Image (cartoon, rainbow, N blue to C red):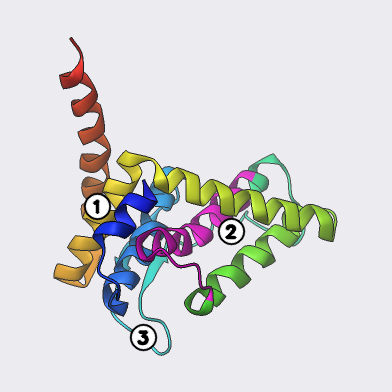
Amino acid sequence: MAKRRAEKRPARVDRLTATAHHEAGHAVAAYIAKRRFKHVSIEAIDDDLGHVLYEAWSKDFRPDSEVGFREQRRIEGAVFTAYAGHAAEAIFTGRESWSGSSTDRDNAFQLASYATGSEEERDAYLKLMWIRARQRLRKPSNWRAVEALANALLRDRRVGYRRAREIIREAIRGEWRMFVESMP
């Protein structure tokens, strides 16, 4: 699927469109991981070209002191979400450069360090989460959600959680409708 998309894209992709796909990737992954956020934006702040403003962790979430099953699931969702922005941008542009994703990568690294017991396990865990982010976003319904949300961001620059959730749900429901309509 990604190769076919790359053929349709112009040779140069403008930075704002790539950023919109990056931030939409974070938001779609957050939706998949059931991680709430306040908004997703492509409004530049300092060195960041866009962001997703996530809901604050609950006060009982302390991965630095104890990592039980619940914390493990939260960390997994956060690492997956952190990598999904870069994964969406890489799928869209056809290039894999971490230059604009260093904060996401650092956050994923820090959280994975809490969830694992050794450097070897941490590195394998991060690789798994990177593969998972790419594969989940390549799923047609999820990719349609990324593109629909990216288009909304390019139009409005900022999309609140409720509207983002509606855009994502509609894109995902679209696949179900296509499946039902294709049945004999």
Say which residue label 1 marks: 162
Of labels 2 and 3, earlier in sequence is 3
Residue 95, above or below 161: below
Q: CA distance from mark 2 to mark 1?
A: 24 Å
Say which residue label 3 marks: 45
**Residue ID at (21%, 46%):** 166
Circle 2: element type: loop
Task: Give the class, few, some or many, for how many residues have Cα within 10 Å of label 1's Cα (few <14, many ≥20).
Answer: few
**Residue ID at (33%, 40%):** 140
The main secondary structure of the magenta stretch is: helix
Q: Is residue 157 left or right of residue 23?
A: left
Of labels 3 and 1, earlier in sequence is 3
User: Residue 174: image x %, image y %?
Assistant: 20, 35
Q: CA distance from mark 3 to mark 1?
A: 23 Å
Q: Are marks 2 and 1 in contact (CB under 8 Å)?
A: no
Task: Give the class, few, some or many, for how many residues have Cα within 10 Å of label 3's Cα (few <14, many ≥20).
Answer: few
Closer to the camera: disc 3 or disc 1? 3
Say which residue label 2 marks: 59
**Dividing the image into 4 quarters, which one contains the C terminus?**
top left
Circle 3: element type: loop
Task: Give the class, few, some or many, for how many residues have Cα within 10 Å of label 2's Cα (few <14, many ≥20).
Answer: few
The image's mark for residue 55 is: none
Q: Hey, which residue is sitting farthest top in the picture?
A: 184
182 or 28, which lies in front? 182
84 within the magenta span: yes
Residue type at mark 3? Ile
Q: What segment carries the magenta color? A: 73-98
Residue 115, above or below 172: below
Q: Are marks 3 and 1 in contact (CB under 8 Å)?
A: no
Closer to the camera: disc 2 or disc 3? 3
